[in-house]
Amino acid sequence: MYKDLKEILPYFNSVGIEILDTDYESLSIDNNQLQKEINISFPNDDEPATVDIDFLYDYYKSLQNGTFINDYIFQNSKKVCVRAYFDEYKYQYPVEEISRVINGNNFSISGETYYISFKSGISEFEFYDAKNSFYDDYNQIFMDENCFFLIEGKKAGTLNKDNILEIVEAFIFDVKIKNRLKVKIHPNLFLFINEEDDFIDESKKNDPIMIGKGLDDVIKIFNSIDDDTSLAIKITSYFQIIEYISQTIIRKELIMKAKEKLTSSVLNDIDSDFIIELSNICVENYKKSRKDTKYIKAAIKECCNLNSLSDLAPDWMIEMKKFKEGKPNENDCWNEIANYIVNTRNSLAHAKPNYIPKKPVIGESDFPEFVDFLEVIVIDVIKWFGNVEPDDRVVKAI
């Protein structure tokens, strides 16, 4: 620990960060003044930031022992910071308040436990920006809306860039579905995002974040969608996520049916008919995996609750409306949902001028309502996938 501020001042002064208090030379650890507040000024900032001396010492040690991975990741032996962005103007709430609303979460990688949270205030990035002159007449270094993702753990220094980004993307997805807020990784200085308000679902706040085999691929697609994404792209992207996860469901059905068949007979009873029946199970499963309506139906049927979906379904979905009115035919409902998803996606994906879409298909005027409905389905499908054992997930290139 350093005896007084004079020993660390040159480090900050070298990048234009100054301590404004005139009596700082009298402030020292020996005087038990670690909690005393002082004002520090970043280059080109209109107003100073207020910190206590203890924070300044920790800040110095963290910078000395850490390294920056490009302009948006900082890492030392015990923590990782990732530059973030939250649109205060869209939500009309300051980021400092939002950082108290968003709950952090524990997670494990290779047997090690870590904790990720969303923070506001000064981070190592202000030092980085001062050192690299990342400011101008219109953009200050330290602003009230500055925020970052913080990963803490005894072995945080061993996480590689891919691990870090996967963890943060999973946390962003978690925040979006629990808090209905859009936060994002902020590798550039001036990005803007939009999303709805109403900040937290208390019933979901303790769910773990989802990381691991296959999840990063689908979560990246989901997180890439925002208010500026066209409705057509949202539909095709959501289809892509369900299609990806459906192959795990199809394989699960194959294994289950094959096991039932294999355990229904003893080894001596296996004959040609038995082998043909087992082969038929595999062929039927293969056909289902190639038929888009069948694998989409299998996915939503496995992952979603029809009662919940019926409350959200648009009125023009006839079978779902009947279900809501107490005239249930579950199979017709699953077929209707799958057909709308597949036919609408195909009508958007096929560019041939003579292509005639199958019915039922959704007109553009109904896209907004359908996209909201489809988003709920996709969240359920991703959450189901996150609860599958990693070794049981079917992963393919997207």
Image: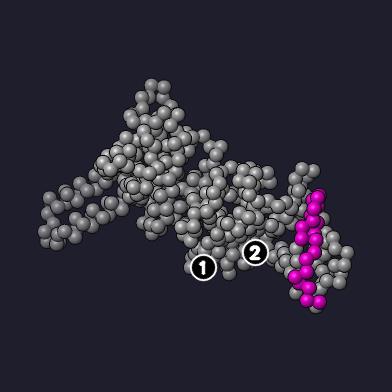
The answer to which of 325 and 79 lies nearer the viewer is 325
Can you say which quadrant of the picture contains the N terminus?
bottom right
Can you say which quadrant of the picture contains the C terminus?
top left
- Residue 15 visible, this angle: no
Tell which circle, 2 or 1, labels the residue nearer the N-terminal end: 2
Residue 7 vs 44, above or below: the answer is below
Numbered disc 2: secondary structure? loop
Taking the image as shown, residue 87 lies to the left or right of residue 359, namely: right
Q: Main secondary structure of the magenta part?
A: loop
Magenta segment boundaries in residue numbering: 31-50
Taking the image as shown, residue 277 lies to the left or right of residue 231, namely: left
Mark 1 neighbour density, 10 Å: few (under 14) some (14–19) many (20 or more): few
Q: Magenta stretch containing residue 41, yes or no?
A: yes
Which residue is drawn at the image coordinates 19% and 55% (left, top)?
Answer: 261
Labelled disc at residue 112: 1
The answer to which of 111 and 172 lies nearer the viewer is 172
Q: Where is residue 152 in the image (x, y as percent from the top left)?
A: 59, 65
Residue 152 vs 233, above or below: the answer is below
Disc 2 marks a residue whose amino acid type is Asn
Disc 1 marks a residue whose amino acid type is Glu
Which residue is drawn at the image coordinates 52% and 67% (left, top)?
Answer: 113
Q: Where is residue 72 in the image (x, y as percent from the top left)?
A: 65, 52
Q: Position of residue 31 (x, y in %)?
A: 81, 77
Mark 2 neighbour density, 10 Å: few (under 14) some (14–19) many (20 or more): many
Which residue is drawn at the image coordinates 27% and 51% (left, top)?
Answer: 254
Q: Name the residue under label 2.
A: 76
Labelled disc at residue 10: none
Numbered disc 1: secondary structure? strand
The answer to which of 175 and 319 lies nearer the viewer is 319
Residue 346 vs 48, above or below: the answer is above
Q: Magenta stretch containing residue 162, yes or no?
A: no
